[in-house]
Image (tube, grey):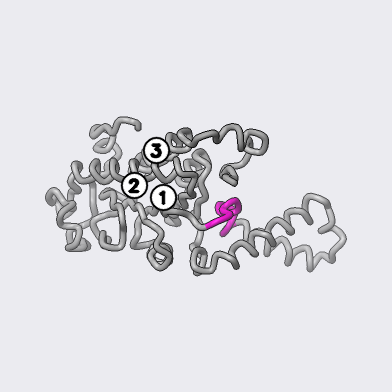
Amino acid sequence: MAEIVVKEILEAGVHYGHRSSRWNPKMRPYIYGRRNQIHIIDIKETVRGLIRAKKYLLKVAAQGSLILFVGTKRQAAASLEELATECGMPFCTERWLGGTLTNFRTVRSRLKRLEELEELRETGEIETYSKKMQSTLMREYRKIYRNLNGMRNMNRLPECLVVIDPGKEKNAVHEAHLLGIKVVALIDTDADPDVVDLPIPGNDDSLRSIRLITEHLTDAIKQGKSMRPNEPKKSDPADEPKPIPTIR
């Protein structure tokens, strides 16, 4: 595991919470103090939460299970997409569609439809349709691609979710709880830590804070994947461009 440096956390502003008037009292154990009406998060609690989360994600990745990254706020989208792709895990950075987990069969059918539309475009068959139908099909393609492209290789339910701001992603967290899926989350002073299995107290609005925490988590996932027994033999032939290797 990469060494967790407190200096990095301070420089990224991970310790800055929300205004004290917006706080959730359940976050009291994670708050160090208050400065200029802004809550300061206890760095020790951040490091403790990060270490626990990394150990857990390493174990999950080593077992070959999937980890779904969820962060639809503008500050989180780019970093989550880049880092989740790097470690070969699915992600959701656009709107969370209701039933993504609880109605997973329907989501898989929409992904199959995405493949059909891509085939129409690649083979040029779409040109045989009328202009109006082409426009309708392209609109359908863009909508499915925007919402589900990050999960196109998610062939089964994930073992856990990595969430940026569980308050904003409450629907995803709720679905995870209904299915017994663990939730690891970067959580600010205005959120409820009780809805998260492994909270990482920290600023969930800063680009640098989100990226730093996500980098540490994805490093643990990469290390866990490298520990899989006999993985290279099985997935070498078809593994190269795929962000999520097929385990079986």
Q: Are marks 3 and 1 in contact (CB under 8 Å)?
A: no
The answer for how far apart the CA atoms under marks 1 and 2 are is 7 Å
Circle 2: element type: loop
Residue located 19% across and 62% down the image: 26
Residue located 20% across and 42% down the image: 43
Circle 3: element type: helix
Of labels 3 and 1, earlier in sequence is 1
Q: Which mark is residue 75?
A: 1
Is residue 1 magenta-colored?
Answer: no
Of labels 1 and 2, earlier in sequence is 1
Residue located 59% across and 64% down the image: 107
Q: Nearer the viewer, residue 218 or 209?
A: 218
Q: Are marks 3 and 2 in contact (CB under 8 Å)?
A: no
Q: Are marks 1 and 2 in contact (CB under 8 Å)?
A: yes
Residue range in magenta is 146-156
Q: Is residue 167 left or right of residue 150?
A: left
Q: Is residue 72 left or right of residue 125?
A: left
Mark closer to the observer (3, 1):
3
**Residue wearing tag 2:** 206
Q: Is residue 118 left or right of residue 158?
A: right
Q: Residues within 10 Å of mark 3 (few under 14, many from 20)?
A: many
